Image (cartoon, rainbow, N blue to C red):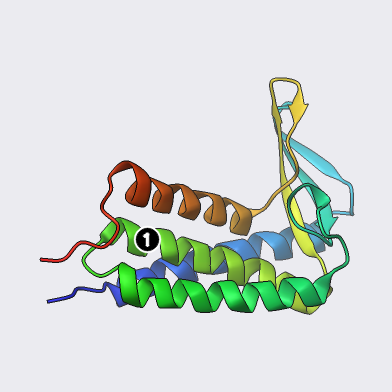
Amino acid sequence: MEKYRIGPMLILAIGILIFDQVTKFLVTTQMSLGESIPVIGETLQITSHRNSGAAWGMFENRMLFFYIITVIVIGFLIYLYKTEASNNLMMQIGIAMLLAGAIGNFIDRLLFQEVVDFVDVMIINYDFPIFNVADSALTVGVIILLIEVFITGKGKETK
C-alpha cells in the first residue's frame, strides 16, 4: 500500500511559507532598502535587498518568464509527489520544501514584481548573493532529492 504523509507535508510546507512571508514582511516594513543589521559581524547580516531576477541576478525583469516557469515547476513537483514519492519520507520532505520555496518567491513576484531577500552571508571573503527563507527551502529540498535519488539510490520505494 502506498503511503503519502499529506498532513505532515502540508504542515511543513505551510510552516516554511509562513516563516518566509513573515520574515520578508518584517524586512520590508522595518528596514530601509540597502540597510544592514549585523548578526555575526560581517559574516552574517540581515540586509534589505530586492531581486527582480533569479540567483545572482539572472533573468532580471522577466516576470512573465518566472510566472510560467513557477507554475510548470509547481505542477511537476505535485506530479513527482504523486508518482515517485510514495513510501519515501525524505522525498516527500524534499518536495514539500521545494513547493514552499517556489510558492514563497512566487508570491513576492506576483505582489511586488521582485523578490525580497535579506540573508547576507560572507564566506571566506566571498560575499554570497543575498537570499531568503524560500531560497533556503529550495536549496535544502534539492539537496534532499539529490541524496535520495543519486546517493541512496532509493527514488521510489514500495513495500
The reply, left or right, for residue 44 in relation to residue 14 is right
Quadrant location, the C terminus: bottom left
At a point 18% along the width and 75% down the height, the residue shown is 2
How packed is label 1: few (under 14 Cα within 10 Å), some, or many (20 or more)?
many
Q: Residue furthest top?
A: 124
Estimate the x, y position of residue 33 in percent, counting from the top left.
89, 54
11 to 58, vertically: above or below: below
- The residue where tag 1 is placed is 93
Q: 153 or 133, which is in the foreground?
A: 153
The reply, left or right, for residue 150 in relation to residue 112 is left
Estimate the x, y position of residue 104 in percent, counting from the top left.
62, 68
11 to 117, vertically: above or below: below
Estimate the x, y position of residue 128 in percent, counting from the top left.
73, 36
Estimate the x, y position of residue 4 in percent, counting from the top left.
25, 74
The reply, left or right, for residue 49 in relation to residue 83 is right
User: Picture quarter containing residue 79?
Assistant: bottom left
User: Picture quarter containing residue 52?
Assistant: bottom right
Q: 2 or 36, which is in the foreground?
A: 2
Q: 121 or 3, which is in the foreground?
A: 3
Q: Secondary structure at mark 1?
A: helix
At a point 89% along the width and 54% down the height, the residue shown is 32
Count how many numbered circles sit on residues in the image. 1
132 to 24, vertically: above or below: above
Q: 97 or 35, which is in the foreground?
A: 97
At a point 57% along the width and 71% down the height, the residue shown is 73
Quadrant location, the N terminus: bottom left
The reply, left or right, for residue 133 in relation to residue 150 is right
At a point 51% along the width and 63% down the height, the residue shown is 98
Amino acid bearing label 1: Ile
User: Picture quarter containing residue 18?
Assistant: bottom right
